Amino acid sequence: MGHVIDYDDESICQQAGYFRNSQAPITADMPLGFKLVPNPAIDRVEVILNGKIDGNFSLLINDMTGRSVFQSNFANKDVSFHIPTHFLSPGIYQVRIAYNNNYTEIQKLSIVR
């Protein structure tokens, strides 16, 4: 107890359940999360933001090896949008919304056929 271990590989650490504290302060205008519907998905998934995002944000989809398979930027007016998934192989992916270059939220997405 009381030991601190520093990890620097974000993907591996998150898969193992280790999380590091964010360096950015949490403010009222940060996103409140998002939903992926349906999950598991077949041909497309709808991303629904749970809160208001002031400014632009990017959405990235990585496979479980960390390889980027999709990336797109969105404006704050978009509260819900569809992402095509027909090009993804069946499996598990990480969907990451990056906001203000220093705050991210991650959810897992399952693709089935």
Image (spheres, rainbow, N blue to C red):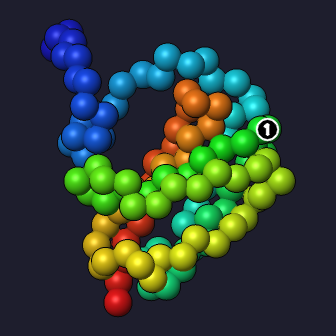
Element at label 1: loop
Counting the numbered discs, the total is 1
Residue at the image point whose x is 24% and y is 36% from the top = 13
Image quadrant holding the N terminus, namely top left
Quarter of the picture containing the C terminus is: bottom left
Q: Quadrant of residue 82?
A: bottom right
In screen coordinates, is 44 left or right of 3? right
Q: How crowded is mark 1: few (under 14 residues within 10 Å), some or many (20 or more)?
A: some
Q: Which of 53 and 32 is in front in this view?
A: 53
Task: Mark yes or no: residue 44 visible.
Answer: yes
Residue 51 coordinates in the image, percent (x, y):
74, 48
Looking at the picture, does residue 107 appear above or below residue 82?
Answer: above
Q: What residue type is labelled 1?
A: Asp
Report the residue marked by disc 1: 54
- Lateral position of residue 73 relative to residue 13, left or right: right
Residue 26: give x, y in percent of width and height: 63, 23
x then y, percent, for residue 105: 52, 43
Identify which residue, 79 or 57, lies in the foreground. 57
- Which residue is drawn at the image coordinates 39% and 61% (left, top)? 69
Residue at the image point whose x is 62% and y is 37% from the top: 99
Quadrant of the rendered structure where residue 10 is?
A: top left
Point 64% across, 51% down: residue: 73
Q: Is 42 placed left or right of 98 in the picture?
A: left
Q: Compared to 101, does 41 lie above or below?
A: below
Residue 41 picture location, percent across and down: 46, 79
